[in-house]
Amino acid sequence: MKDWQASAAELYGGNFRPMFVGGNWCAAQSAREMQATNPADGSLLATVPQGDAADIDAAVTAARRAFEGPWAKFTPYERQNLLLRIAERFEAEWETLCLSDTLDMGMPIQRTLANQRRVLGMLRFYAGQAVSVHGQTIPNSFPGDIYSSTVREPVGVVGAIIPWNAPIAGSVWKIAPALATGCTVVLKPSEEASLTVLMIARIMQEAGLPDGVLNIVTGTGAEAGAALAEHPGVDKIVFTGSTATGKAIARAATGNLKRVSLELGGKSPVIVCRDADLDKAVPVAAMAVFANSGQICIAGSRLFVAREIHDEFVRRVADYASKLKIGHGIAPDTDIGPIISGRQAERIEGYLSAGPAEGAEIVTGGGRATGTGLDGGHYFQPTVFGGVTDEMSVAREEIFGPVISAMPFDTLDEVVARANATPYGLAAGVFSTHLGTAHKLANRLKAGSVWVNMYHAIDPAVPFGGMKMSGYGREGGSEHVEEYLDTKAIWINAD
């Protein structure tokens, strides 16, 4: 078994980690720095530049220069080959990438390691897409001998902003389709978790990525993120994060009418029908929320259970939750890692207080986790609320913590109406052994992804994204590649 503790001690050591602009590793122009701390114990991992509008401008300039320069001459085959080389480098350094993610944002190491198939699959899927982009020859009805066709062209410079809860997958999901289509990228990682993204830039550079095609500017959302969203030299902005920030980005993008893709918050319903296989449903429904300590946009945090089985099912979910191991992410047996920051911990505590104040019952958990090995971090017991009504804040608002709100239902029509009565529409889950019931619910739920007798399934070939206030645009599948392309019509008079 790998000694993760020893590897962790060697990885960063509190040193300065520069950002990546135009193929160069550099400090912020202001010389300001930010601390990158381990959420498991509060220890210093490294320092990174605190970039701002000046650094964003330099990165956009570098991305534009690359887009109009050598990168424009890369053939689809060459872009494909580059992505395949990057995938090989990712595979060779996978354990180091995972360790960095675990140290920087707390996800248990076994969970980060388990993402290998998905991340490598994304890189190789988009490598395939690089040679699949094509236009059409279109018969037209214009008088004369007129030839009409379309070509697909890269949209240009892409500004990408990602959250802290999955830096490896989040980065690849933004960068890989841009490279496949011939775009260039300026990526702003979360100030809470920048280190892995800088490591990814180093890996891609070593794989042969030309200077300026990928640029990483570390900094705060208020400074660097806002400057990227507003920058007139950015042709498209892609963002994953909160709905409130997504709205601000959409407003900022109107300055030059840049294209926008948003994957935002959720308050996803999980519906357990009376004919569900409870043995299979209990662990899946529990980990639909408790995975990554609930810090997942698709967390199935509203648990609707048929009244006939409600009490038994909620009790079993609570029993399952109470046995989950809470601890430091690099411990191989950890199920529930730390919350990313003190600010997010205070937010979760607010909901843990609001639930009982509004009449909810704590079935299990309900507070911070303390004990040996948990000092210096922000840990929470996995919590199940019973006696919840649709009007309570714990049932309406995204908590982004390990908290489930359980509610009974009587009819399918009722549960569909209640499940859809939310401004969000990112994901949903259904548990039923009746095929007709599963189809009926899946078709009626207003969500971008609906999982039946499973949860959290994401594949590079399958589109993912939200409805309503959970955003627009898709990541994954051919729809994702379309987000990075413009269509040009060409008319030729052959007379």
Image (tube, rainbow, N blue to C red):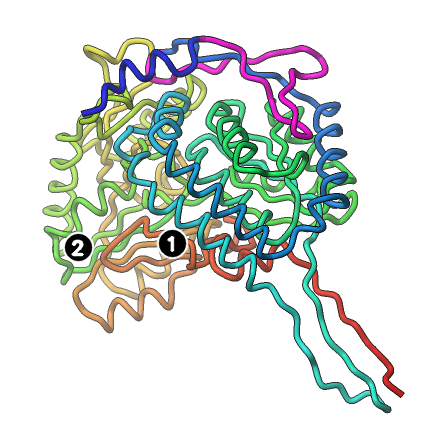
Depth check: 69 or 118 in front?
69
Which element is circle 1 on?
loop
Depth check: 7 or 80 in front?
80
Q: Quadrant of residue 386?
A: top left
Q: Where residue 479 appears, x then y in whole percent?
A: 53, 61
The image's mark for residue 410 is: none
State left or right for residue 479 relative to residue 151: left
Task: Name the quarter where the N terminus is drawn.
Answer: top left
At x 86%, y 85%, the residue is 494
Amino acid type assigned to the residue bearing label 2 in the image: Arg
Q: Mark 1, residues whose alpha carbon is within 10 Å: few (<14), some, or many (≥20)?
A: some
At x 78%, y 43%, the residue is 255
* Residue carrying label 2: 307
Give the mark toward the camera: 2 or 1. Answer: 1
The rendered magenta stretch, by its main secondary structure, is classed as loop
Q: Quadrant of residue 25?
A: top right
Q: Where residue 45 appears, x then y in whole percent?
A: 43, 13
- The residues colored magenta run 14-41
452 lies above or below 302 = below
State left or right for residue 136 relative to residue 267: right
At x 51%, y 47%, the residue is 83
Amino acid type assigned to the residue bearing label 1 in the image: Asp
As measured in the structure, the alpha-carbon distance from the residue carrying label 2 to the one carrying label 1 is: 34 Å
In terms of sequence position, does the residue under pointer 2 or pointer 1 come before the other? 2
* Residue carrying label 1: 459
Q: Mark 2, residues whose alpha carbon is within 10 Å: few (<14), some, or many (≥20)?
A: some
Depth check: 393 or 267 in front?
267
Q: Where residue 452 appears, x then y in whole percent?
A: 27, 60
Depth check: 281 or 398 in front?
281
369 lies above or below 84 = above
